[in-house]
Image: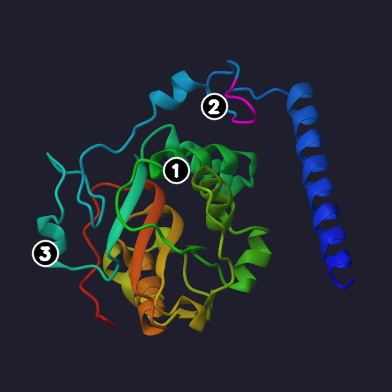
Amino acid sequence: MAVLPAVASLCASGRTRALRERLAALVHGLFPPTCYLCLDPGQPPALDLCLACEQELPWLGCCCAVCAMPTPQAVERCARCDAAPHLFDAACVACRYEYPVIELIHRMKYRGELALARVLGTVLGHRLVTRVGPRPELVIPVPLHVARERERGFNQARELARYAVRELGLPLADGLVRRLRVTAEQAALPAAERQANLRGAFVAGAEVAGRNVAIVDDVLTTGATADALAAALFAAGAHRVEVWAVARAIGYPPAPAVQSYR
């Protein structure tokens, strides 16, 4: 008879899920998606971006498989990565950091227009379904320090990751990495100072040991944030670390090579 409460719980969970799905369908029917860029109808059930505008985004083409810097043809490792190796194993990025992607990211990140997280996160998810390589077991958004997140009111990487993982059918493993101290905003620093700004800023939990991990961020620029987070993950025993980002900033020098923990 002890099985009955568990069965009842599962039934209740199923009813709750069905109710959520019905409510979502009702809301989407009453408020159909509208493209944020051109105001044409969006893509059902709830993407505020039409297919034409999505196809015209500045998608990242051929690039280095490690750092996602554009290259004349796809390569496993570019000359920049040979000169200044990254700690992370690979990167998968959706778009170049150009208009209108840069505008959408800024509106989400600095103006708090969180509805754009669904647009950008889904765009990232659409790119990720075409990636090749080992399937990650943990998807971790780049964490903010609690004080910075309290000030901003949200973590943009977490909001993006929530929608990206839906396209892949993966769970979001939030809270496995902590930011130990408040750091200066990376975007305000020259490339040479970004690595020092983040040195020792993260610590990862034991849950990452032996796992393939993907970390999610809005923009991949010099790779300093990703390297600092990869250092913490490898120090905790992670097997592989891949970087997922909505956009790749072009024209920045790479971060200096960093110590490997593998």
Q: Which residue is mark 1?
A: 124
Report whether residue 96 is seen.
no
Extent of the magenta region: 42-47
Percent from the top left, x then y, of residue 64? 20, 50
- Residue 148's image quarter? bottom right
Percent from the top left, x then y, of residue 124? 45, 43
Q: Residues within 10 Å of mark 2 (few under 14, many from 20)?
A: many
Secondary structure mostly seen in the magenta stretch? loop
Kind of residue at disc 3: Asp
Along the viewing direction, whichever of 218 and 13 lies nearer the viewer: 13
Vertical position of residue 255 compared to residue 259: above or below? above
Q: Residues within 10 Å of mark 1 (few under 14, many from 20)?
A: many
Q: Which residue is mark 2?
A: 49
Is label 2 in a helix, a strand or a loop? loop
Q: Residues within 10 Å of mark 3 (few under 14, many from 20)?
A: few
* Outermost residue to the front: 1
Is label 1 in a helix, a strand or a loop? helix
Display coloring: rainbow
Along the viewing direction, whichever of 213 and 40 lies nearer the viewer: 213
Q: Which residue is mark 3?
A: 82
Kind of residue at disc 2: Leu
Residue contact at pointers 1 and 3, CB within 8 angstroms: no
Kind of residue at disc 1: Leu
Which residue does the image show at 45% across and 56% down from the upper left?
217
Which residue does the image show at 61% across and 25% down from the upper left?
44
